[in-house]
Amino acid sequence: MKRVMVPAALALGLAGAAWADPAEGIWKTEVDDGAYAHVKMSPCGASICGVIARTFNSSGEYKSENIGKQLVWDMQPAGGGDYKSGKIWQPSTGKTYKSKMSLSGNTLAVSGCIGPICKKQTWSRVK
């Protein structure tokens, strides 16, 4: 029985890696308050989350105090490249918004709202 279980478990583990969420990877944000970031999107349970991996301004890359901080969390895949019920943090204001995303190829449309006030950005995949 052990001879069957080990290869089966290994095959399932390798197959799981092949089923990566299409939003996984590194994404470049738009400029906000003179700076932009590379955000690493990865699974967090059944959701997708994003952490600030690198930061840039008009002088180039710099070491922001926001590196390593979570920018996106609780994004639930909704099918067809859409994500819902997430949260997004805007470092320049310190505000957290209810958020959703829509993936189309190497473009990720991200929006967040607090009440009637909404903001949108289009992120591009970093290759």
Image (cartoon, grey):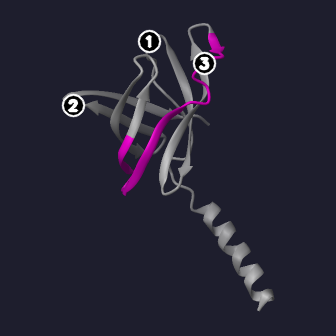
Taking depth in this image into account, of 109 and 50 the one nearest to the observer is: 50
Q: Residue at x 63, y 12 (%)?
A: 60
Going from the N terminus, do you reach mark 3 or mark 2 first?
A: 3
Q: Secondary structure at mark 2?
A: loop
**Residue 83 part of the magenta segment:** yes
Extreme residue toward the bottom, this view: 1
Q: Which mark is residue 119?
A: none
Where does the magenta region start and end?
A: 60-86
| Residue for badge 3 | 65
Q: CA distance from mark 3 to mark 1?
A: 15 Å
Q: Is residue 65 left or right of residue 36?
A: right
Residue 109 image position (x, y, % from top left): 38, 37
The kind of residue on which mark 3 rests is Glu
Residue 68 image position (x, y, % from top left): 61, 30
| Residue for badge 1 | 33
Q: Secondary structure at mark 3?
A: loop
Going from the N terminus, do you reach mark 1 or mark 2 first?
A: 1
Q: Is residue 19 left or right of residue 103?
A: right
Taking depth in this image into account, of 43 and 110 the one nearest to the observer is: 43
Q: Residue at x 48, y 57 (%)?
A: 46
The kind of residue on which mark 2 rests is Gly
The kind of residue on which mark 1 rests is Asp
Q: CA distance from mark 1 to mark 2?
A: 22 Å
Which callout, 1 or 2, points to the residue nearer the camera?
2
Q: Is residue 44 left or right of residue 100?
A: right
| Residue for badge 2 | 115
